[in-house]
Amino acid sequence: MYQGISSEKQKQLKSRMKSLDIHECDLAESFILGSGSGGQKVNTSSSTVQLRHIPSNTFIKCQRSRYRDYNRYLARKELCDRIETQRYGDD
C-alpha cells in the first residue's frame, strides 16, 4: 500500500483506522506541490497530502517528508490521532 513503510506498521494503521470506524471511501485525498526546504525535488513534485475525513469534516495537510507515500501514511496516522482526541479527549 505505502512504499517504504513496513508491512507491520501498515497493518497497525489499518487496524487502528478500522477500530475508529475510518474507511478509505470516507476520505477525500488530494496532492499539491511541496514547498520549503528539501531541495528541488520537494518544490517540483506533488508530495504534500491533503486529506479530509468527510463524516467528521476533519482536515489534515501533511508535508513532513518529500515522499508522497510516507506523507499519505503520516496523514492517516494524524487523522486517527485527531479523531481519537475528538471522541475520547486528551486522556
Image (cartoon, helix red, strand yellow):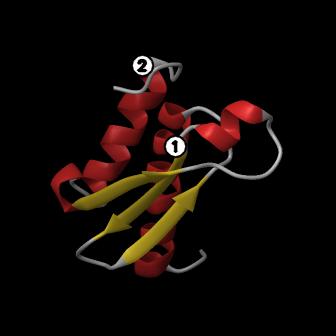
- The mark nearer the N terminus, 2 or 1, is 2
- Estimate the x, y position of residue 15 in percent, counting from the top left: 32, 41
- Estimate the x, y position of residue 4 in percent, counting from the top left: 53, 19
- Estimate the x, y position of residue 24 in percent, counting from the top left: 22, 50
Q: Which residue is mark 1?
A: 46
Q: Which three-letter amino acid code belongs to the residue tagged 1?
A: Ser
- Estimate the x, y position of residue 77 in percent, counting from the top left: 49, 50
Q: Which residue is mark 2?
A: 7
Q: Which three-letter amino acid code belongs to the residue tagged 2?
A: Ser
In the depicted structure, whether residue 60 falls above or below residue 14: below
Q: Nearer the viewer, mark 2 or mark 1?
A: 1
- Compare residues 27 and 41 and report the one nearer the observer: 41
Q: Residue at x 37, y 48 (%)?
A: 16
Quarter location, residue 20: bottom left
Count the numbered circles shown: 2
Q: Residue at x 75, y 34 (%)?
A: 40
Image side of residue 23 versus residue 75, left or right: left
**Mark 2 burial class by Cα count in 10 Å: few <14, some 14-19, many 20+:** few
